[in-house]
Amino acid sequence: MSQIFISHSTQDAPVAQEIAARLSEAGAQVWIAPNSIRPGEDFLAAIERGLSTSTHFLLLLSESSMQSNWVRMEINTAIKLEREGAMQIMPVTLDAADVPLLLQLYQRLSYNGDSGLLADRILEALGIDVRPFWAPRPMEDEEKARIQAGLAEIAAEAAVCVLCPLHQERHMAVPGDGPPNARLFFVGEAPGPEDDRTGAPFVSTAGEFLDELFEMIDMDRRDVYLTNIVKCRPNENRDPKRSEVKACADYLNRQIELINPDVIVTLGRHSLKSFLPKARISEVHGQPHEENGRIIIPMYHPAAALYQHRYRNMLIKDFLTMAQWLNARR
């Protein structure tokens, strides 16, 4: 895993700590004195340990740092490690200090007082991706527009669909919602009562619990795609019939083909059957399965937790496990 060693003078410590905090907030692993020094550890030994375990060297260049013997020692060690291919160096100028000839070959950034912006630029310049696995994949605007147009076409078709009896009592079809470049694709079973009134997925009571699960693992529902195996709500809150699932299958298949997610999370046993027909949710929930080059993660439906508390605990455990598994793939 990437680790950023921040080299700074005593006078520059407040700025260094602020930058370190912003980098940490962004998900980067940071080594900075004195925070990273272990209790009772010799200062020099701590510095040597920090440098040897770091992959990136962030040097805060200022008049005071260029006069610090400690900083000079850290620079020399970092250059040696870089020549061995073990470290990448990034100087950041804090003031008008003269840049030593040895450091003039490196790309430099300038600090303008905005530590958040600088943290983003540092991560980008060092090529460190600290976004969670489920963050939408980078994509050109033209490609996003193409996929969005395809999703809009599916939504328009679903809105006037009469392929099964579900259309007779719907208020609104609920095709789905999320970014066209989503890596994660959540598939429930059918719209809830509030979904049916608004046309938005997972905004009923079960959706509120799903939001709690997202918040628990720092996942933003705006980063993932949410839909169901059927796009209209069955009356009396019943399970969707096989014929209704079959009638809606083309819409779902086209959504998956357009978005091409890395991971599909099925919510509920009926959703699971659409992807792993022979699987039993009681046996496979929370366990990733590879199917046709894509990962399927079965989960109980959040609505189940509204009726039986044991499903709530299972969902919480499975979401935490899923987050760990996904981030390990980052």
Image (spheres, rainbow, N blue to C red):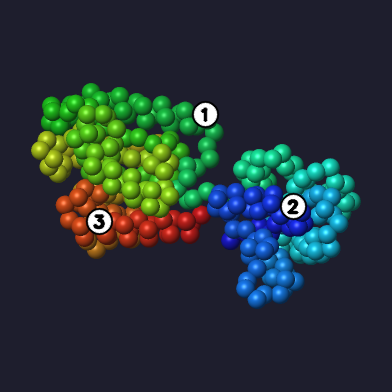
Give the crowd class for mark 3: few <14, some 14-19, many >=20 residues within 10 Å: many
Q: Nearer the viewer, mark 3 or mark 1?
A: 3
Q: Which residue is mark 3?
A: 312
Residue at 34% in and 26% down: 153
**Residue 142 marker:** 1
Foreground label between 3 and 2: 2
Q: Position of residue 268 (x, y in %)?
A: 23, 50
Relative to 252, residue 22 above or below: below
Q: In the rendered image, which quarter is residue 248 located in?
A: top left
Query: What amino acid is found at the position of numbered circle 3 in the picture?
Result: Arg
Q: Earlier in the sequence, mark 3 or mark 1?
A: 1
Q: Is residue 10 left or right of residue 234?
A: right
Dot 1 falls on a residue whose secondary structure is helix
Query: Tag 2's secondary structure?
Result: loop
Q: Residues within 10 Å of mark 2 (few under 14, many from 20)?
A: some
- For the residues carrying marks 1 and 2, which lies nearer the camera in this image? 2
The numbered mark, 1 or 2, whose residue comes first in the sequence reads: 2
Q: Percent x, y for residue 31? A: 65, 61
- Residue visible at 24% across and 63% down? 283
Q: Secondary structure at mark 3?
A: helix
Q: Nearer the viewer, residue 77 or 282?
A: 77
Residue at point 28%, 47% (across, down): 209
> Residue 241's image quarter?
top left
Viewer can see residue 197? yes
Amino acid at the residue labelled 2: Asp
Question: What label sits on residue 160 in the rendered view?
Answer: none
Q: Is residue 73 above or below residue 27?
A: below
Q: Is residue 92 left or right of residue 312?
A: right
Residue bearing mark 2: 12
